[in-house]
Every structure is written in structure tokens, then in C-alpha cells.
Image (cartoon, rainbow, N blue to C red):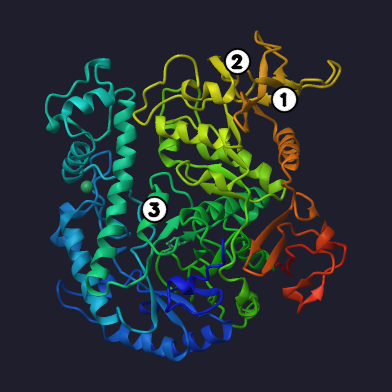
Amino acid sequence: MSATPLRTLIPNLPSGILYGGDYNPEQWPESVWLEDARLMREAGVNLVSLAIFSWAKLEPVPGRYDFGWLDRVIEILWRHEVSVCLATATASPPAWFSRLHPEGLALGPDGQRFTHGGRQHYCPNSVAYRSASISLITKLAERYGRHPAVALWHINNEIGCHVNACYCPVCTAEFQAWLKRRYGTLGALNEAWGTAFWSQIYGDWSEICLPGRTPTYCNPTQSLDHHRFVSDSMRRIVETEVAAIRAVVPEAKVTTNGVFVMKSANYRDWYGLCDVAALDSYPDPHQGLPENRAAALCHDFYRGFKDGLPFILMEQVSSQVNWRSSNVLKRPGQMRAMSYAAMARGADGIMFFQWRASKAGAEKYHGALLPHVGADSRVFREIRQLGQELRSLSRVAGSRIPARVALLDCWHNRWALELPSKPATFDYLKIFSFFHTALWNNHVAADVVSPDSDLARYDVVIAPTLYQIPVARAEKLRDYVSQGGTLLTTYFSGIVDENEHVHLGGYPALLKDVLGLVVEEWQPIPPDAKNGLRLTGAGDDQPAVPCGFFSEVIHLRGAEPVATFTEDFFAGSPAITRHRFGKGEAFYLATQPEQRFLESWLKELLGDRGIRAPVRAGANIEVSLRRADDEEFLFVINHDRNPAAVDYGVWTGAPDLLSNGAPVPTGENLPGFGVRILSRHIS
Ligand code: GLA
Ligand code: ZN
């Protein structure tokens, strides 16, 4: 795993860490642009996302373009050494589009059309939208595609953040065509959807509807395919826009900004179309640590979307957003700490929405690098300081996260798991976070990867509620364990195939041999109830560890119990098991123990395999290691406003890049929102 600076993949990018944000000069008179560029240089900005919402200015009348102003903006930026991530400008079609193509506006599930006046009002499958987008993008690519300032293309903007599924006749026809491609014959579709149930058998493709308003549960496989179709429809926008650019400039480099880990988008699949993954992240600073951990989860996801390559934090806010009920400020120092938290987990770009705070429009109270009050402000001073620091951290760019643990993620699994009519209501990210947080608190790195990736790279693979397992995936997991890997999976895993059909013969049918057990029944635990578990070997006088949400009745077929349930009719039966299989081991958690227990149990399991925290620090501290070819960087970040103790252990004396290389003491109280980036050479 050698270091891969983004610049080696995207040659026009500035070197080092990317720094900047969305720039919307069309909201300002030209007289402001020069001051913008001057202040950008002062702040250390080296990249801006330009023209995201400029369609109406670029094409004021259908087919008539005005690029003069954009020429001048790019020219000014380039003179000030600011590169451009040029948007395709398709995120908000102009009013003339809505007037000429009312059928191109999305239709809600209630049958109501969206009207003009917001943004992202288009139907994702609209032919008129697609062709108008291609015309505009072609012109943009012809004019700017080879401009040295244009480093990267910004495809659309947060596709699907407001409107993902549309229920218009065009989308219905597209859904039918999508199904025809997937299944080939109606017979195959009827089989896959299990339409013998509730008299749902289809005799003609035209009979198939989008899952809209059904009196009760819609066919689950139909709903699952609809999730796939919605994601594919939005992915097609990325594909179309990338193709339009590359028809003119084949070597053009592209990205698109994803929204957190939005349910409707299978980003892992989308980013295959892009050269770099880019994330928009707005954790609520008021919520503190849980939000920082949620952000860390996203960072690990986005790093995983491109197999560990650095990603770009494309949007965050400097101070406060404008869309919560109470838009709390990032406190002094918190923006810096949160920026380094992204970098700690693989971001090589720290970007914001937006450069200059708007004076009109729906986002005028959203924070910016340059607030309404101007450059003489706390926010701008913090931005300038961070910009200066980042300049000195160029050598971190391209370094990778050397994780020995993988968390398995599959969006089809999420969609399937969260369909209704299950034994309980499942929240995929909640279950996923339960494990991710346990690793975070143990200061152990994990990659979030697809079950189809090369698992042999990892010593431990954690698969939280891998409910949907197609046969081939079960084979992969079996191979992984038999070759010496450690697999940890949980309740309600391995239940169905890709069509939401149950694998019969005792759960989890395809993994029974690997886990050495069979699950006969499950017993969800309502929120107001609990079960308990006790480690085998612990005396009956030891208090039971509370566990909740789900429990299962297990019969051992070779596995040994690690812990047993203490309550209910299956008290004494296994709650956690361990099974040697081939050269490896498989663990199974039949319930959700309380977080503290999971953390300490996992710590031991990982420790037995030589996986340990690099330093000793409390639970408010984020710790992450990045590795370059001959140097390692240890990020230590205090997310709390109060000081917190850190014991640097073997890192004692290592130079801190944020303190001019001063050696770090053995231990200290790291100040509130304090950050250290320690370095050491490796051979
Ligand atoms: C999103 C959008 C931006 C802006 C911000 C506000 O991330 O991409 O255009 O609306 O939200 O937080
Ligand atoms: Zn539609």
C-alpha cells in the first residue's frame, strides 16, 4: 500500500492538501471578485468549486450561452494560484426549463409536481433534462476542458439530496425497462418477486408500478428493486455528465459530492465512475462526540468507496448551518479540530460551503469562510490559520490508513434489512455504528469495505447484521475464515438471498458450518425490556451484562459458547459463540450487548491478534494513523472543549508537525479541541 497523492491521479490539482470551498461569484458584482481572490490567497485557498448553481447565468435563454463572466472569474482565480473544480452547473435548471418542459419536473409519490423556486426540481429520468444538461456540459467542456486552472470536474451537486425518487410516467416506464434488463423474462421476475403471494402475478410488463401508495406492505422484492432503480437512475446522471465531458476531453478528471451516507444512493457503485470520492459532512457541533463519531464513520465509508485512496471533504461549514432548528456555532477551535478529523481518516481536501456568505437567498444565514462581517472576524482568522498550517502538511497528502480490521458494508443489505415486515425494525447505520464506535473508542482503525473486496488483507472482518447473503458471498466468507481470518458476525445475518428469499434449513443456512451453530428462532427485545448475558467461566454471582434489541435461540454444532443468556425461556443457551473453522475463527453475537461490554470484549479479541491502540487516551479523543512510504503520521484530536489526558507511550518525543516539530511529552492534558500530528520515520 504505497502513498498515493491525489495529484498523481489528477495532475492539474494543486500539490499537498486541497483547501477551499464552493465559490458563487454570480451572486456578486465583478468588483468583489478581485477581493475574493486576494483573500483566498491570504487564507491559503488553492481550490474552489465553481459554477454549481450557475446554469441560469450561463444559459440565460435556451441555446444562448454567456461564458464571458466565467472566463473572467477563472482568469482572476488562476492569477491568484487558485485552481478550479468546475461544476457541470446542472444542479438547478433555469426557470425557462421548467416553463418549456413541465413534464421534466419531478412528481412526488402523492402525484403532485414540484414547482420552480427551489432547486433540484428535475425528474432524474427526464429526457429534456438530460439533453439540456448534455448541451450545456458540452459547451463548458469545449471552453474550459483544457484550461490549466480546471483541475477537476464537479458533477452536478448532491444528486438526490432533495429529490431522489420520482413517480412520473417516464420513471414508471424506465422502471419497467430496468426490470426487463435485470430479469429478461416476466417469468423470472414473477419468481424473484414471489408474486404467487397475494395474487401479484404479472402477465405484462406494463402492469408493473412504482411502489407508491399501496394499502399495506408493498411486495418486498419490488421495493428492494425500486431502491436499486432509484440509485441507478441517479447514477445514470453521473454517468451521462461524465460521458458528456469526456466526449470532448477524454482525459478529464471527475468527482461528485455525496451527501453523508444517503440511503437512496449506493455510493460505492457511483464512485466507480469518479476519479476521487468527495463527501459533504455537516455534523451538529452541539451534539458533540456522537456526531464526531458519525462523521468518522462517513470518513471511513468514503475512503472505502475508492479502496483506501484519499478522498475530498468537499463541503463542511466553518461556523453554523441554517437548516437545523437551532444552528449552533462551531466553537473557537472546533472547525480546525473537525477538519483534522477528516484528514486523520484519509481526507486530502478540506473544503467548505461556501467561500463568501450570501446576502440574499435561502442560505444567507449559512456560515462561510468569509462571513458577512468580513475578514476581520474570528471565523476568517481561524480559516487563515488552518490554511497556513495545511501548507506545512503537504507530505501527509497521499498517505494511507493501515487498517487491519474491516467492517463489511453492502447497501443492498441495508435496503433489504430496512424494508418493513421484519421481526423487528432494523436501523442499519445504528447497528453499524455500534461496532464502529466500539472501534473508535478503542482507537483502532477499520476500513469499511464491500464483502466482494479482497478480505485476505484484514486480520479481522466484522459483518454487522449481514442479513442479505447471496451464495457467492457466503463462499467468500467461508474461504476467508478457512484461510486463517477472524470473522465476527451477528444476529439476523445470512437470512436471505439477493431477491429477499429466505435460505431455508435453519439460519444462517449458508454459514452454519463456518459458525458451527444453527439459529432456530429469534426473539426481538422491545425497547422497554432487556435480556442479560454472562461470560462462560464467570461465576453466577457476577452481574449479567445487559443486552437488548434482538436475541436468538442457538444450537451449537461445533462452536463453543463464549457467553450465555441469563433471562427468558432460553436462559443458559449461547449468546456469543466462537468456532474454529479451517485455519481461522468465526465469532457470532446473537444479541446486542451494551456498548461498554462490546468495547472491552472487542479490545481483548483484537489484542489477542496484536491489534492495539497506538496511544492511550480517553473516549473524547480521536486517534488515527496515516502511513506514507517512509513516514507515519499519528493524529490525536480532542473533540471536547475540556482538556483530556493522553499518554503517548512509544510516540513520546515524536515531533508534532503542528508545533514546529517540537517533541511531544510522554503524557499531557491535550487542551479542548487541541490537535497533534506526530510523525516518525519508518523503514
Ligand atoms: C449542501 C449543498 C450546498 C449547500 C449546503 C448547505 O451540502 O450542496 O449547496 O446547500 O448543503 O449546508
Ligand atoms: Zn420522473
Q: Are marks 3 and 2 in contact (CB under 8 Å)?
A: no
Q: Is residue 209 left or right of residue 631?
A: left
Of marks 3 and 2, the one in the foreground: 2
Q: Circle 1 sits in a helix, a strand or a loop, which is it?
A: strand
Within 10 Å of disc 2 (Cα), the crowding (few <14, some 14-19, many 20+) is some
Within 10 Å of disc 3 (Cα), the crowding (few <14, some 14-19, many 20+) is some
Tell which of 638 and 241 is nearer to you.
241
Q: Is residue 122 left or right of residue 593?
A: left
The image shows residue 328, relative to residue 495, as above or below, that is below
Query: Is the distance from the Cβ of mark 3 to the nearest ligand 1 atom less than 8 Å?
Result: yes
Q: Which residue is mark 3?
A: 161
The residue under label 3 is which amino acid type? Cys
Residue at left offset 54%, top offset 77%? 370
Q: Which residue is mark 2?
A: 557
Q: Is residue 619 left or right of residue 144?
A: right
Residue at left offset 40%, top offset 21%? 502
Residue at left offset 48%, top offset 59%? 279
